[in-house]
Structures are given as structure tokens and as C-alpha cells.
């Protein structure tokens, strides 16, 4: 017999799974963005804890050329200010700063390999 999962709980778990896909950049950004759009922006509930290792892995993918500056900017924009994400306490301010700077290269510094290498060093 299949276990009954309340719709609210299913939707919450689905949301966090999707947010996890976003953080790890495991799907195309357009797909993640479209799927996230079904959820309300405001969120109350358990948050996904983002670890520095997850952000470092995405930065390394950029450094290696697997993803480009436009993609990493879009990725950071989707992460920035989410209510369903919290950064690990040990590196919270560093993670917030890295995501902000990647999401706002016109206000801060253009995304480059050298910048992302600096971010890897800061988060390591």
C-alpha cells in the first residue's frame, strides 16, 4: 500500500529538492527557474543549509570552463535573498558576500576566473 503524503508536505519536500538542484547547479538554470516559479516567493518552513563546498564546486566548474559568466550570474541571482536557503554558520557572511558579488557584477566586479579563484580561497 502506498504511503499517503499530505500535499503541503510533498510540495515542501519538492521545493527543497529543487532548491538543492539550484545550489548544486545540477540542472539547466532555465529549467530550475521555471520549476521554482510555481512556488510562492515567501516561505516559512525548514530551509536548505548551503555549505561552502557546494558553492566552491560551482565556482570550480566556472573556472574549468564548464559554465560561463552569464550562467554563474544567473545562478547567483536565483540564490540571492531566497527565504528557503540559509548559509552554513561557519562561513555565512563569506557565502552571502560571494553570492551577492556574483549576482551583481555590474555593481561590484566583473566575473572572471581570477575572481572566482579568490572566492574559492575565501570559502576553503
Image: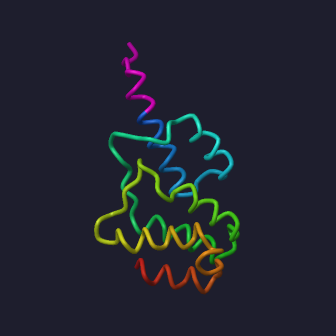
Q: Position of residue 46 (x, y in %)?
A: 33, 43
Q: Tell me: 57 left or right of 66.
A: left
Q: How many labels does the image show?
A: 0
**Residue found farthest to the top:** 1
Q: Nearer the viewer, residue 26 or 82?
A: 82
Q: Which residue is drawn at 64% across and 41% down?
A: 34
Look at the image and tell me in which quarter the C terminus lies: bottom left
Q: Which of 123 and 40 is in front in this view?
A: 40
Q: Nearer the viewer, residue 78 or 67?
A: 78
Q: Which residue is drawn at 34% across and 72% down?
A: 91
Q: Residue at x 60, y 86 (%)?
A: 114
Look at the image and tell me in which quarter the N terminus lies: top left
| Occupied quadrant, residue 75 | bottom right
Q: Nearer the viewer, residue 56 or 15?
A: 15
Q: Is residue 119 above or below residue 19?
A: below
Q: Is residue 116 above or below residue 17?
A: below
Q: Position of residue 78 (x, y in %)?
A: 56, 55
Q: Tell me: 28 left or right of 82.
A: right
Q: Where is residue 107 in the image (x, y as percent from the top left)?
A: 61, 75
Residue segment shown in magenta: 1-11
Q: Identify the image's colour scheme: rainbow, by chain, secondary structure or one colour.
A: rainbow
Any magenta on residue 3? yes
**Residue found farthest to the left:** 89
Q: Where is residue 74 in the image (x, y as percent from the top left)?
A: 64, 60
Amino acid at each position: 500500500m502506498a504511503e499517503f503524503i499530505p500535499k503541503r508536505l510533498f510540495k515542501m519536500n519538492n521545493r527543497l529538492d529543487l532548491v538543492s538542484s539550484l545550489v548544486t547547479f545540477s540542472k539547466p538554470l532555465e529549467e530550475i527557474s521555471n520549476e521554482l516559479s510555481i512556488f510562492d516567493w515567501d516561505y516559512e518552513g525548514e530551509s536548505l543549509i548551503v555549505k561552502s563546498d557546494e558553492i566552491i564546486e560551482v565556482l570550480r566548474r566556472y573556472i574549468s570552463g564548464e559554465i560561463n559568466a552569464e550562467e554563474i550570474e544567473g545562478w547567483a541571482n536565483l540564490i540571492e535573498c531566497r527565504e528557503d536557503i540559509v548559509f552554513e554558520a561557519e562561513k555565512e557572511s563569506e557565502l552571502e558576500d560571494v553570492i551577492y558579488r556574483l549576482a551583481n557584477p555590474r555593481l561590484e566586479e566583473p566575473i572572471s576566473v581570477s575572481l572566482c579563484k579568490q572566492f574559492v580561497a575565501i570559502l576553503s
